[in-house]
Image: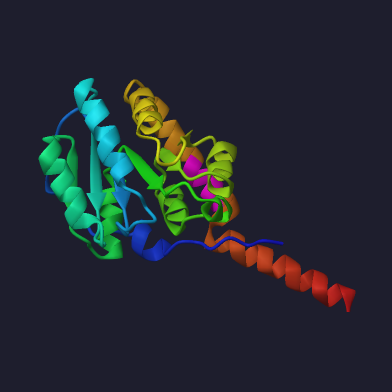
Amino acid sequence: DIIPNWCDENALLNPVVMNEEQIFSINQRLKIVFAGNMGKAQSLYTVINAAQLLQHKAVAADFVLIGDGVELAGLKNAVSDMGLQNIIFIPQVPMNVIGAYLNNADVLLVHLKKDPLFSITIPSKTQAYMAIGKPILMGVEGDAAEIINAAKCGLTFEPENPEALADAVTVLTVQSKKELKLLGESANQYYKENLSLNSGVNQFARIFEALSISE
């Protein structure tokens, strides 16, 4: 049996109290949050190029990139050079503060470069995002995409394809608040039943019980 890792539930699900004015500006634009390392594996220039497409089409959505990494300076320079107004950078923050940001997002983004190795990888932020209970945009092929499709909690798109990401974002911008809420609830329900600490403990218990019976 495969038992997936669970997230730091205590820190994520009990975040520091922050009102929305401290986190994002109050407006009607869809806020899509990516939180984590900004390295070559995450291939976030895909997000930059998608943002350019969305800005050109005047789609009411903003990307919020939270964290640090070797690509951060280059990403910031690209955003500046391209004159993008729909990307916000936020420095790395502790896990309990991340929880506050994720709770105030509309959609959460996972993205890795297009690589066969990543098709058998489930990025750890997947569990965290699902536990928070928000719609998910999954730009990772294979196992990770299958989880999102099984949970019916968001949209998957081809990695390193800015057009595919922009199209997925556009679809989500026309969803009602109720529809987005239902996607988030599906994510949370799937996490509780299949990926949570409690689920993992129960799966371990079943394995140990089966081993003891076989002896």
Q: Nearer the viewer, residue 181 or 130?
A: 130
Q: Quadrant of the N terminus?
A: bottom right
Residue 105 drawn at (x, y percent)? 28, 42
Residue 30 seen in the current view: no
Q: Quadrant of the C terminus?
A: bottom right
Q: Would you say the magenta stretch is mainly helix, strand or loop?
A: helix
Is 163 left, or right, of 57 in this rendering? right
Q: Nearer the viewer, residue 200 or 72?
A: 72
Looking at the image, residue 46 lies above or below residue 41: above
Is 11 left, or right, of 116 in this rendering? left
Say which quarter of the image contains residue 163.
Answer: top left
Residue 8 drawn at (x, y percent)? 42, 64
Residue at the spot 19% in from the left edge and 53% down from the top edge: 74
Residue 28 magenta-drawn?
Answer: no
Residue at the spot 42% in from the left edge and 49% down from the top edge: 113
Give the magenta-colored segment's residue range. 187-192
Residue 191 magenta-drawn?
Answer: yes
Residue 21 seen in the current view: yes
Say which quarter of the image contains residue 208.
Answer: bottom right
